[in-house]
Image (tube, rainbow, N blue to C red):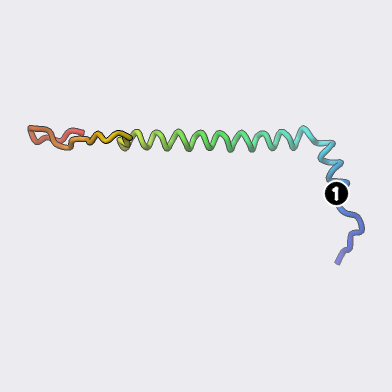
Amino acid sequence: MFCFQSGCGAPLKFWLDDNKAVWCSVLAVFGGLQLMSIILCIHIIHKLKDKTGYKKTSEKRRLHNEKGAYSL
């Protein structure tokens, strides 16, 4: 079992200061991916609602016309 006398706080702080461009870029990429996935999900949900004929009005669709044929 190893016992470390010094913590990793100081070396970690030095690494973060030296490589600020790297970790800022990585965080920006992850943030951009999350934003794009949210926008894509919202777009897909709206397309599915349009495809299924979801309407907010109380208008009902007729399944049969006067001649008995199907019409959507």
Q: Residue at horizontal 36%, vertical 36%?
A: 49
Q: Quadrant of the N terminus?
A: bottom right
Q: Residue at x 33, y 35 (%)?
A: 56
**Percent x, y of residue 44:** 43, 36
Residue 14 percent location from the top left of the image: 87, 41
**Left or right relative to 43: residue 55:** left
Query: Mark 1: which amino acid?
Result: Gly
Residue 63, horizontal then vertical, whole percent? 17, 37
Q: Is residue 45 left or right of residue 9?
A: left
Please give the name of the residue rendered at 35% of the width and 33% of the height, measured from the top-left corner.
Answer: 50
In the displayed image of the protein, which residue is found farthest to the right?
A: 5
Q: Residues within 10 Å of mark 1 (few under 14, many from 20)?
A: few
Snapshot quadrant of residue 69: top left
Vertical position of residue 5 compared to residue 56: above or below = below
Secondary element under disc 1, as helix, strand or loop, is helix
Q: State the residue lying farthest toward the front.
A: 58
Q: Where in the figure is residue 18, as x and y percent of width and height?
A: 84, 36
Tell me the quarter of the image containing the C terminus: top left
In the foreground, 65 or 20 = 65
Most distant residue in the left direction: 67
Q: Quadrant of residue 21?
A: top right
Report the residue marked by disc 1.
Answer: 9
The mark tally for this picture is 1
Q: Residue at 84% across / 37% down in the picture?
A: 17
Left or right: 46 as drawn, with respect to 8: left
Quarter location, residue 61? top left
